[in-house]
């Protein structure tokens, strides 16, 4: 699945690439190798990720300010796995206040607090229903039983990439998740997922 939630899809660079997180070397190496990187380059990756985080170029958990910054970072560390996908997330203006009201402090809230349109140059892939709980996203896929109920009750199902085709369907799913006491105590909202080329387009 294509997802902004690390519960569903591994991220690069994830929390594991920050020097101060409690992750052992073997796990860090395995996660770097997962993305096609050379485990021998782990030290350089951890140093670069930590420095970029402290400088505000990367926000928790793996949020870059611009697509080109993300491209350069991946190229610098020779991450080449074919499933690595650069995505942008867009939230509707009418949902911004509800999202920010949860009070999380992460890269997603920092981006949403700025009224900046989602960058062009990408392709809209679909909608994901997400809840920012404790500084990271949970996806509607984190509750497979409820997802199955949604399919039966309102007829909304994910496509092959795990995304919902339209905003109306995603909004309907978010309403069901918000009303269910078994989900995370955070606001569920529809987010547009836009994919971008991992290599810069030629001019």
Image (tube, rainbow, N blue to C red):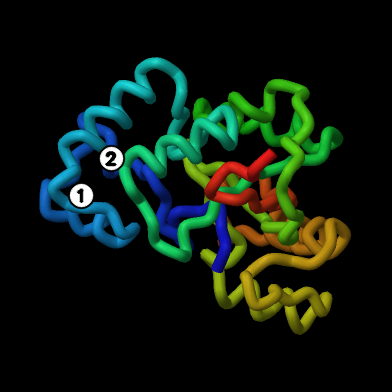
In the image shown, does 71 or 152 lie closer to the viewer? Answer: 71
Q: Given contact means CB atoms under 8 Å apart, are the residues at marks 1 and 2 in contact?
A: yes
Q: Measured along the vertical axis of the image, is residue 21 above or below residue 149?
A: above
The x and y percentages for residue 87 are 60, 48
Question: Which numbered marker is on residue 163?
Answer: none
Residues packed near mark 2 inside 10 Å, few (<14), some (14 to 19) or many (20 plus): many
Residue 184 in sight:
no
* Residue at the far bottom in the pictured view: 152
Is 67 placed left or right of 14 in the picture?
A: right
Counting from the top left corner in percent of width and height, residue 152 is at 76, 83
Q: Is residue 24 left or right of residue 82?
A: left
- How many circles with numbers are drawn on the protein? 2
**Left or right of residue 70: residue 124:** right
**Residue at 78% over, 60% down:** 170
- Horizontal side of residue 6 vs 115, given as left or right: left
Q: Quadrant of the C terminus?
A: top right
Q: Taking the image as drawn, is residue 150 in sight?
A: yes
In which quarter of the view is residue 76 placed? top left
User: Which quadrant would residue 179 be assigned to in this image?
Assistant: bottom right
In the image, residue 113 sits, relative to residue 186, either above or below, namely: above
Q: Please report whichever mark, 1 or 2, sits nearer to the chain's N-terminal start.
A: 2
Q: Position of residue 4 (x, y in %)?
A: 55, 52
State the mark number for residue 28: 1
Spatial CA span between label 1 and label 2 = 7 Å
In the displayed structure, 114 sits above or below 91; it is above
Disc 1 crowd, CA 10 A, few/some/many (<14, 14-19, 20+): many
Please name the residue that numbered disc 2 is placed on.
Answer: 17
Image point 25% across, 37% down: which residue? 45
Q: Looking at the image, which residue sits at the far top?
A: 55
Taking the spot 51% from the left edge, 53% from the top edge, the residue there is 5
């Amino acid at each position: 699945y294509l997802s902004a939630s690390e519960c569903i899809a591994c991220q690069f660079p994830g929390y594991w690439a920050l020097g101060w997180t409690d992750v052992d070397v073997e796990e860090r190496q395995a996660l770097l190798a997962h993305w096609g990187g050379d485990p021998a380059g782990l030290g350089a990756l951890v140093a670069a990720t930590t420095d970029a985080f402290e400088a505000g170029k990367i926000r928790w958990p793996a949020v870059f300010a611009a697509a080109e910054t993300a491209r350069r970072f991946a190229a610098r560390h020779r991450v080449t796995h074919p499933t690595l996908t650069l995505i942008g997330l867009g939230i509707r203006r009418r949902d911004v206040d509800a999202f920010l009201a949860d009070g999380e402090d992460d890269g997603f809230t920092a981006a949403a607090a700025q009224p900046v349109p989602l960058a062009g140059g990408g392709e809209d892939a679909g909608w994901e229903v997400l809840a920012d709980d404790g500084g990271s996203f949970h996806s509607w896929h984190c509750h497979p039983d409820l997802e199955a109920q949604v399919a039966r009750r309102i007829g909304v199902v994910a496509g092959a990439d795990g995304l919902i085709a339209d905003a109306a369907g995603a909004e309907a799913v978010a309403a069901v998740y918000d009303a269910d006491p078994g989900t995370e105590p955070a606001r569920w909202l529809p987010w547009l997922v836009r994919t971008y080329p991992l290599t810069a387009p030629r001019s």
